[in-house]
Image: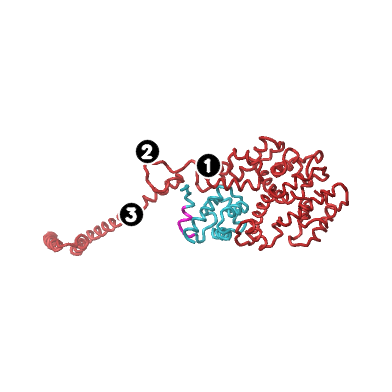
Amino acid sequence: MSQFVENPAHLSKFRLKSDLVAHDVALPPSKSKKEVYVGLHLQHIGQKNAVDFSSDEEDQVQDVSDKEEDTEMPDPSGLTDDDLKAALLELGVKAGPIVASTRALYEKKLRKLLQSNGHGCLNGVEKGVLYSDSEEEEENGEEEDKELGSEGEKEETVKQSDQAQQGSSQFPSGSQSVMPDGESSMSSQAFSITRMVEEMESRRSLSTSSDTEIELNGSNVQKHWSRSNRLDMPIVDTMKNQSLYYTPKASPYKWKMKLTQEPVKDTFKDMFPNTDATTTGIYATRRRPIKGAAGRPVQYAYPDTPVSPTTLEKREVERRLVPIQIQILVFLIVMCLLYLIYVCVEDNSFGPSVALLDSLYQGSDSEEGLLLQAETQDVPALSGQE
Amino acid sequence: MSSTSQKHRDFVAEPMGEKPVMALAGIGEVLGKRLEEKGFDKAYVVLGQFLVLKKDEELFRDWLKDTCGANVKQQGDCYGCLKEWCDAFL
């Protein structure tokens, strides 16, 4: 990319920015003036004055393509909140408030939309620019293996797999029929793709690191995609064959859009590698029981699904607890009654005991009858004692 | 109707009040910790983010993925849980 930078001051601000990113230079604040970028560019990348005169024409072509990009505002992070909102509106997205927490998301969305637009607009320019030898290919490893059969649309899938390989082994910078001139237009894509690929890399490094010798053609790329995608996207294998020709950024969204209609199949597949994270008791096998199947009566209107054995036990215990309390209460009442009776009997005073007994036993009309009976009994008892 | 988890039903049954972020469907211990580290320590803070994103599914899913690394299923559970809660109480 940089060998065609003859005079940074002639480049667009966006181009300078992407060059800096490609060379791992820390970017100045997004609203800095162009001179800052030019200074940094000169400082780190240096000025190569007319190394290849023959590349002048191509250089101009690059600038033209840059200017074409600039009209689309391809640098979401350099926009103000209002500009970002306006840009999204132009592309048909009605954005909500752009605050600190939402800004990153809207930038990502804008980039994705620009990429999908950029593919349509800039492919002609890219293919028009012919390949030539490139000197500084190490840093731009993502674009190195384009020769291996991918151009234009496929370049990003190649970049993706290349980035993974880059982590393990660096590619030789020789023998490429790369289109470095297309880098200017692809730098915008590279800018976002590098970020994406970094994310993918970080996830891959966590899961698998055995992708050292991936060939870009055929099944290996598919496997690569399957591994990387299984991390966070439930994608059926058959879809990946088609996905090779999509941009990695656009395709996940497309897949997600398609998959929203089929949550069952995909979540099922997705759950297996991710059972560790979910502790909500959701099990793939437990679904709504079929009516009367296997002798299971239909008990509840709700599907009787994700109930672990422990919760079942708890519920049963709870059902029993209430009766137990009632039983205890009844027992205590009976005990009190018996204690009172015992105390009264011990006193050997039948008057109060009889009164107590009467008050305890009866509240009905027969109370008088009992009193009479008690009195008659008392009299012979008292007389007996005497 | 797709099957909902008990956690989902529990969350949607009442106003969330001061429930922790782990009470959300799809958010377990690991994800809950990550969210808390980012400052989303209560469910209502995540609700706030959900509302600021205008209840847009795609944006909210992306945000969840970026913030705590939720997979698609977890994203979907959380989104569905919040959406239903909003339908009921908001």
Q: Quadrant of the C terminus of chain A?
A: bottom left
Label for residue A265? 1
Disc 3 marks a residue whose amino acid type is: Ile
Chain with red colouring? A
SS type, badge 2: helix
| Distance in Å between CA atoms under marks 2 and 3 | 38 Å
Say which label, 2 or 3, has the lower sequence index: 2
Residue B4 in the image, given as x and y percentages of width and height: 48, 49
User: Which chain is home to disc 1?
Assistant: A
Disc 1 marks a residue whose amino acid type is: Lys
**What residue did someone put label 2 on?**
A295
Please name the residue shown 67% across and 36% down the image. Answer: A220
Same subunit, labels 2 and 3: the answer reads yes
Which colour assignment does the render follow? by chain
Residue A323 in the image, given as x and y percentages of width and height: 33, 52
- Looking at the image, is A265 positioned above or below residue A333? above
